[in-house]
Image: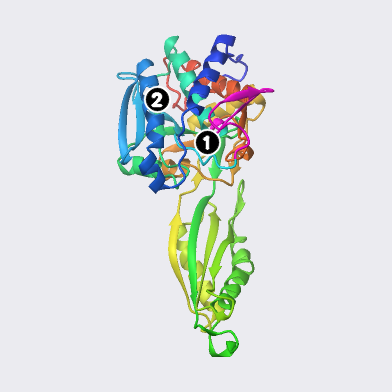
Amino acid sequence: MFYNAPMRLLTQIEKQRVCDLLTSLVGINSVVISPEQANHDRAEERMADFLNDHLHKMGMTVELREVYPGRPNLIAHWPGQGGNRSMMLESHMDTVSTEGMTVAPFAAQILNGRMYGRGTCDTKGSTAAFLTALAIAAESGQLPNDKLYYVGTVSEETGCLGAAELVKSGFRTEAAIVGEPTGCRVVTAHKGPLWMEIETRGKACHASVPDEGVNAIEMMSRIVAFVHGPWKEYLQGRRHPMLGASTMAVTMIDGGMMVNIIPASCKASLDGRLIPALSAKETVNDFQRMLAAYLGDDTDFVVTKIESNPPLDCPSDAPLTGRLLELCGRANGQNRPEGVHYFADSGAFYQAGIRTVLFGPGNIAQAHKADEYIEVNQLFQATEIILNLLTEHAGKPILCNAE
């Protein structure tokens, strides 16, 4: 164990190095608003091209795997490095829109110990920390005896499609650290999103004679009552020790044509967040069955769209998890695994059998915000934690249960 070992801290030159890299990453417009826009703008390709060049200079072999035209996942490793065990450091290359930002989105300006700009927090800060730590460890000849990969994915902000395609193609490692703004804490669990669209179908008529029609909006109001009544109670029946209960909320409603017409159709969107014990398929089946029983024969409804992403529930005693928790304990006192309510690429990796945790600098409260920023000291701390994870196992495997 390494509980009492002093942390290897960054030098001033190394601190400047990680700041310079993050400045370069933030300066690349990799905004993805929709898959259609991304296919046209090739925003993620700009990030992939920069990272390709940067990783080649680090001596890594880089493979670009196109997920959609102009939108490649990136996989890098050192040829011939590592033994039989493998792990990846992963972060997504896309960011959300810059619309409404109150700071220059691509300037990476540092003020009062914070670097501002789109992606500083989510999640180019993690990318800079991971790559700087890898580079320093490699240059000093202190890499562990695990086959190390850096992976950059596309389309995390629009459904984690890049990660899903990566595992679909057969890519696997034994363990993974997914870069997200966890405040330099180790996250081992998150919920899985479940999105549904539901439509009620009535009969239109003139609003002056409402009894001659069937009001689809009134039907939908009964579904809203179900979601916030019996269905909420049902979801509360199963809980996760870190995540609590699953949730579901009605987030959009669209109904009616004109003020003087009884609406024949009403549509609603539902956002569910499921604990790992609940599968999306079984939850949808239970929802439809219970809703039909609640409504009886009076309401005609149909679920028109279902989308979901997998949750994360990695054992806290997995080798990589234990070592990362140990280092976080030494660096910031946070040596207990945590759960979060948002989701990330981690779900796809964990579902594929990869022992996965979330870790990175930044506060999730700043992700997607108009004044997005990262605390520079957290950027340094994340780099130090990953660097120590690598160098303290120089020539030895990280992924080994025996010390």
Indicate whether residue 251 is drawn in magenta: no
Q: Which residue is mark 2?
A: 50
Q: Classify 10 Å Cα crowding around label 1: few (below 14), some (14-19), many (20 and above).
A: many
On screen, residue 59 versus residue 240, left or right, reads left
Disc 2 to disc 1, C-alpha distance: 24 Å
The image quarter in which residue 13 lies: top right
Camera sees residue 183:
no
Q: Position of residue 175 (x, y in %)?
A: 43, 33
* Residue 318 against residue 143 in the figure, above or below: below
- Name the amino acid type tagged 1: Leu
* Residue 331 against residue 122 in the figure, above or below: above
Q: Earlier in the sequence, mark 2 or mark 1?
A: 2
Q: Going 44% across and 57% down the picture, which residue do you hit? A: 307
Q: Which residue is mark 1?
A: 358
Q: Classify 10 Å Cα crowding around label 2: few (below 14), some (14-19), many (20 and above).
A: few
On screen, residue 69 versus residue 137, left or right, reads left
Q: Going 51% across and 76% down the picture, which residue do you hit? A: 292
Q: Position of residue 365 (x, y in %)?
A: 64, 39
The kind of secondary structure the magenta stretch mainly shows is loop
Most foreground residue, 18 or 27: 27
Hey, which residue is sitting farthest right in the picture? Answer: 112
* Residue 289 against residue 139 in the figure, above or below: below
Most foreground residue, 273 or 153: 153
The image quarter in which residue 164 lies: top left
Which secondary structure lies at badge 2? helix
Q: Going 48% across and 71% down the picture, which residue do you hit? A: 199
Q: Position of residue 264 (x, y in %)?
A: 50, 79
* Residue 298 against residue 57 in the figure, above or below: below
**Stretch in magenta:** 101-120
The numbered mark at residue 157 is none
- Name the amino acid type tagged 2: Phe
Which secondary structure lies at badge 1? strand
